[in-house]
Amino acid sequence: MVYTETSTIMQTLSHLKALEAESIHILREVVSEFQRPVMLYSIGKDSSVLLRLAQKAFYPGPIPFPLLHVDTSYKFREMIEFRDACTRQVGARLIVHTNRQALDDGAQPFRLGTQRCCGLLKTQALLDALRAGGFDAAIGGARRDEERSRAKERIYSFRDVHGQWDPKNQRPELWNLFNGRIGPGESIRVFPLSNWTELDVWHYIHRDNIPIVPLYFAKERLMLVRGETLVPVEQPFIPVLPGEKPRLVRCRMRSLGCSPCTGAIRSDADTVPKIIEELIAARRSERENRVIDHDQDGSMEIKKREGYF
Amino acid sequence: MATRAVLEPAFEQYLARDGEKGLLRFLTCGSVDDGKSTLIGRLLFDSRNVFEDQVQAAAKATRNRAAGEVDLSLLTDGLRAEREQGITIDVAYRYFATARRKFIIADTPGHEQYTRNMATGASTADLAILLIDARQGVLPQSRRHAFICSLLGIPRFVVAINKMDAAGYHRAVFERVRDEFAGFLAKLGSPQAYFLPISALAGDNVVARSRRMPWFDGPSLLEHLETVESGGLQASTGFRMPVQCVSRPDHAFRGYAGQVVSGAIHPGDMVTALPSGRRSHVRRIATFDGDLAEAFAPMPVTLELEDPLDISRGDLLFAGSGHPHMAGRFEAHLIWMDPRPLDARRRCLLKHTTQTVAAEVTLRHRVDIHTLHAEAAPALEMNAIGVVEMVTTKALFFDSYRLNRITGSFILIDPETNATLAAGMILQPVAAPAGSGPVTAAERMARWGHRGAVIEIETASLAVALERALFDHGCSVAVAASRSAASALKGAGILAILVTPSAPLRDVAAALRQLQQQGVLVSRDTVSTGGGI
């Protein structure tokens, strides 16, 4: 078979524009092919990018799906303030869901361990919220470069009636033709940022001037300093060791989760270009300071099989 | 800090430059144990794209196995089952960048039973790296993968003959494998291939050029990847945009949202919509970042047209020379991906661009991946490749896959299990066999290249001249005796010419122009823009 090369001079897009194009195509497909899509909004930088892409995909119309925030109640205060301001400004409909029952029963990471705490406040809460809303497609900001099992996941990730992922039996995903057909109770998790890297996300935030939570920028914050680890002291239940006192440290968050499980890093990076400069110099990967990924070998894969994003 | 103030403008410049870097998507394939995962690990490691903690995690896992110092393949194998068995099951995507380019790697499985996952990785790649173990030589799986890559239209190959360290870095070994495989690629009619000897394990010719093979003076793998022409996915058809959705935020605006899949479009350009065949001009190319003076593939846009055309999801907008086919019957290559084989005939759903239609697939023959010959077969098993005839309940608007990887591709879906059954690559439309039920409007349109219309023209002699001109171009045309007869003919998809003394049309050329402008004539085969008539 002979494939002809085009003889005309071809214009090509920069890698950021090419990634943007792919993501917008995906978002439009989701809205066109599902009855009740929803966008998972975690307030982090990836969610900020996803939100901007949704604005672009449907411009000049409004974003045609609600945003869902699964609030464990242990998020940083600044995250919640940013969430409310940002969604109001964009004009998006926001749904906030919390596993009240588990919190009333005293769920927190130091009592239950991070695995069980995440299971109840994130995975269970998410599945409950998706069921309550009758959502058949949930759009999330996960990227394949974050973690080894994510690198294997499709852009359209099929979930059974229990919200579970079967990594060994994924639908082949060819070209830009997504198979979003599902049976009753089944759903698809959609990852429009699959092919973006952490660095791409930052470049895009810089280029498009996208607002992000101030926690990403370095400033003096009260931290418990434990060797290399900086533990934020937002929640009263953080166990303080004898003689230990929070200190003001110039630092920032590299990724945002629940405050008890998110370590800060020492940093002077208080602008987006400085963050990018720091990242290029960095030799440690992004999720490393997220305790939950390391509690067991292949732990993210296990969480995902159970229904975690 | 004074130094920072000096450095910052330079860094800003770096950021601006870096944002404009191009993108190359490639896949790695080859037989199992040819060292794909190790090669990627080496590429990432030597180009300093791996994080320290990832290397530590790989080193920790290495102790459980009998590999070298750090098993670089562990940097990529992501699933527990894969790490346990030491093989790659599913396609994994990896990302890295150098100062020149950003790369997306699809690391695909070598085992035959996971061929469908390999095809997944190949469908979006614009370059394929085929690994061959220098000691094993060309294996059946090497040929299979080369064939699939070629079938999926990947325009560039790199053939990396690996494990040269275990073959004594001998030139003769490299040349023997190269010559054997070059012969096979020639049979595929394959695109440019760059052959090079490497050792992923020892790092020869991966990032840095090898000093242990002075007899080879070509660029290293990474040097080649950084400089090879990219943009392989671009098609050689004119402007095409399948409509994804219609944007109607208020009564003042109606836009058609979609991704430009080939060609370019500008405000003022004339576009034709299929299936209606109606035409209009582009008023605005609307985007969040402002209206554009030009959009080209693969940009996502929202087009506002001058006239209100009845367009919805699944329709196709196109412009320029070269019309897409519009047909409900075509021939295609198929890679079967379901555990249940394709029997001689099967009903299923077909997704093509932005529409999903019911379809029937009939197996013509299987393709032998070693000889590339057609062979009769009662069924197509999982991972087998065949040629099929597809009949859809609605006409599709397509190009052959050879010309356009987006408008020429489709997937088949099982209507009961919703599984993705197959990947299809369109070869060409085929004529319907005689006597297959009632003739549909789509079939008439596909055959004649036009829809039904009444053409009013001033005199009887002009009517005869016009009838002759259209007939000679393959149209179904007749001069009608009355308005009601004309209307009936139109309903049957025929061009009905009606003599009306007050008609504004006074010559044949004007009538033809009008038919084209109104989009009555749509087929590429019957529209002649040559000035003869």
Image: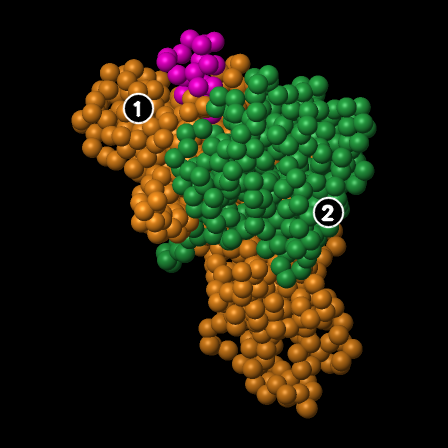
Residue appearing at x 68%, y 24% in the figure: A237
From this view, report whether residue A104 is shown above or below residue B238.
Answer: above
Q: Position of residue B42 (x, y in %)?
A: 36, 25
Q: Position of residue B283 (x, y in %)?
A: 57, 71
Residue appearing at x 66%, y 55% in the figure: A89
* Residue A139, quarter of the rendered image: top right
Residue at the farthest bottom position: B502
**Front-most of residues B202 and A139:** A139
Instruction: Tell me if residue A147 is in the magenta stretch.
Output: no
User: Dot 2 surroundings within 10 Å: few (below 14), some, or many (20 or more)?
Assistant: some
- Kindly state the secondary structure of the residue where label 1 is placed: loop
Report the magenta residues as a range.
B56-76
* Residue identifier under label 2: A94
Instruction: Tell me if residue B65 is in the magenta stretch.
Output: yes
Chain B's colour is orange
Kind of residue sitting beneath label 1: Gly
Residue appearing at x 24%, y 20% in the figure: B169
**Front-most of residues A237 and B160:** A237
Q: Which chain carries label 2?
A: A
Residue at the farthest left position: B214
Is residue B123 visible in the rendered structure shown here? Answer: no
Q: The green chain is which one?
A: A
**Front-most of residues B192 and B487:** B192
Q: Position of residue B33 (x, y in %)?
A: 42, 18
Q: Which mark is residue B203?
A: 1
